[in-house]
Amino acid sequence: MMIIRRDYYLDQLVAGRGNGLIKVITGIRRCGKSFMLSHLFRKWLLDHDVTSDHILHIPLDDRRNSELRNPDRFLQYIDSLIKDDNTYYIMIDEVQMMEDFVEVLNSMLYMTNVEVYVTGSNSRFLSSDIVTEFRGRSDEIHMYPLSFKEYYSAFGGEKNESWKQYYTFGGLPQVAMLDNNQKKMIYLENLMSTVFIKDIVERHRVKNDKELEELIKIIASSIGSPTNPTKLVNTFRSLKNFVTTNKTLSKYLGYLEDAFIVKKAVRYNIKGKKYINTLAKYYFSDIGLRNASLDFRQMEETHIMENIIYNELVARGFSVDVGTVEIREKNKEGHLVRKTLEVDFVANSGNERLYIQSALSMPDDNKKKQETASFKNIDDSFKKIIIVRNDIMRYIDDNGYIIVGLFDFLLNHDAY
């Protein structure tokens, strides 16, 4: 079996040892949470002198462990395995299958020589509720599907071919392991319909699952386009020929965000230093799921590239907004009119800020002028970056803007 390294997350697990908190691994279904604990982290512990009898892996979805879904029996079982004062590493998969699991985890905080790690893979556990349940008592590690760097490190080959595979089928590890395109398509389409949508429908008692499916398709087909529930209602009315409400679509969007299927990027007025809540953009956590939602029919590389850049920034720990810059310029009649320019991404992490434009290509000065128009109206000195699909050498132009090729950006964190 091929092992795909996930060092970014492994390092977080290693760093969290001894912090006295429950380590909660969250993330979209099938992104590799269980494998991270039971294989990669376990191997690290064994390589660093932790004996196997001090690593307890308990998959509660295994029928043979069904009795341990009872909270009292589970705690008795853990007590029976702890024989000395050395540290025990307890890894619980599918913890939500245990009754009163919140109380169980709280009880384990009183055990002085255990490190507790939990994952879950249904929408109840994957929702943001889990963070609220354990606020102040947990250390959340959020996992994402494979980045392009992780994907390429595992599969190698020619970069352009790897890119085509990645932007078509995404980064869910099980998909990446399949040996032909047809299997990948079928797997993703089934996963979307029988797992993700089913979870949301069951948890939130959604009565009209077709309406939810149509919303997913509309968002998937309009990556990079600002929208809101009102605009979506109009889209349903004009394209789908049936009526829904702002309230219903707002709830559905919340369900999709809670399950980490999509993530919202809010618009930010750069000059006014304030958020604009009227419109937002939605990006898919895994581009393969997005493409599967559309039956792999709308494969515009420019929009897919923008989604992947967004995911890369978020996975690197940035808070990412969509930037707007308001300017005044003369129209053909010579009158001053207000115009809004856009910055694809405003990425913030601590004191670091990046302004980023995603451009499939910049074949001439007119295209470059179009991409940099918003940059020229931003007064601060934070880095301004244009990421182009072309595999070019990084350079800085006369205005101080950084132009970097997509592969360099995705494969090298120091590219900018």
Image (tube, helix red, strand yellow):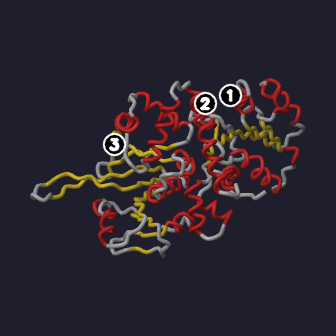
Q: How many marks?
A: 3
Q: Earlier in the sequence, mark 2 or mark 3?
A: 2
- Mark in the foreground, 2 or 3: 3
Q: CA distance from mark 2 to mark 1?
A: 7 Å
Q: Earlier in the sequence, mark 2 or mark 1?
A: 1
Amino acid at the residue labelled 1:
Val
Name the residue: 28% across, 60% down: 377
Q: Nearer the viewer, residue 369 or 287?
A: 287
Residue under label 1, please give it.
Answer: 102
301 left or right, relative to 75: left
Q: Is residue 186 above or below residue 254?
A: below
Residue under label 3, please give it.
Answer: 276
Name the residue: 68% across, 62% down: 154
Residue 286 at x, y percent in the picture: 56, 49
**Neighbours of disc 1 within 10 Å: few (<14), some (14-19), many (20+):** some
Residue 342 position by quadrant? bottom left
Residue under label 2, please give it.
Answer: 133
